[in-house]
Image (cartoon, helix red, strand yellow):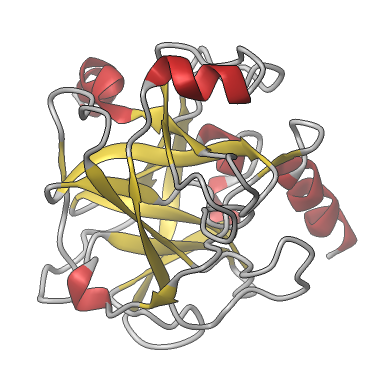
Amino acid sequence: MKSIILILTTIFFICGGAHRGRIIGGENAAIEDYPYQVSIQYNDGFHFCGGSIYKPNVIITAAHCVFGLEAEKIHIRAGSNNRNSGGVIVTVKEIIPSENWNSQTIDNDIAILILTENLQYSDKIQPIEIAKQEPQPGKLAYSVGWGLTEENGKESPVILQAISIPIWERNDCNKLVKARLTENMMCAGVKQAGKSSCRMDSGGGLAVDGKLVGVVSWGEGCGKYNSPSVFANVPKYISWIQSKLN
């Protein structure tokens, strides 16, 4: 168990001060409103990241969530807004992170999980389509997860949390994140403090108009003033995803 905790601690803080996904300032969410969202957990039930259903046996998440982990030691819970109960649990068969994932720059922070069996679709379990292009600045996006609700919190909420946040103009965001933004990243958030994604929301989806545009990746602190969250720019990876699934 100590080795598992060490691995997860390394994953969460791999960027030295940059947060790893949690929802701050959110509200309880029904899974029927976000049926693509899943909890990624160790087999002992420890939730550590989120993901999005893309195909019956395919989950899209962040590379930093699963890089270096053993597939047989993790599973996903789908179809429930409660990370501890309900829905269905399916084991992961294969982990496919981007070959260009860079833990220093956090670039190409995307991965695919292949499940051991297909999910059965229902009103609580549905796939989400990938947007064909990056959304325009100002578009309203939705981010959900089971991450901590306070920057220095000790335990993540049991019930799924959701926030609505606008997409940021790339140049404005880059000024605030110390010129670390690449074309494979995008920003969303509010200028005022108290509302953002953060640790243990990582890997969860950012949706605009019902389509997947981002994966929770990193940020400079959580819920701070003028501090947007950074997401993997999923439309950039459509060809990569298809090549791996083919």
> On the picture, is 199 further left or further right than 2?
left
Question: Image quadrant of residue 137?
Answer: top left
Near-viewer residue (100 or 44): 100
Q: Is residue 25 visible?
A: yes
Check the picture and name the quadrant holding the N terminus: bottom right
Seen as rendered, the residue at the extreme front is 192
Q: How many marks?
A: 0
Looking at the image, which residue is at 79% across and 42% down?
10
Where does the image place residue 132, in percent across and percent down from the top left? 12, 25
Near-viewer residue (81 or 141): 141
Check the picture and name the quadrant holding the C terminus: top left
> On the picture, is 108 further left or further right than 42?
left
Looking at the image, which residue is at 46% across and 56% down?
50
Question: Image quadrant of residue 189?
Answer: top left
Where does the image place residue 30, in percent across and percent down from the top left? 28, 80
Looking at the image, which residue is at 62% across and 24% down?
177
Q: Is residue 58 visible?
A: no
Q: Where 204 falls versus 148 (above or below)?
A: above
Where does the image place residue 205, in percent across and percent down from the top left? 35, 48
Where does the image place residue 94, in percent across and percent down from the top left? 44, 41
Q: Where 223 falls versus 110 (above or below)?
A: below
Question: Image quadrant of residue 142?
Answer: bottom left
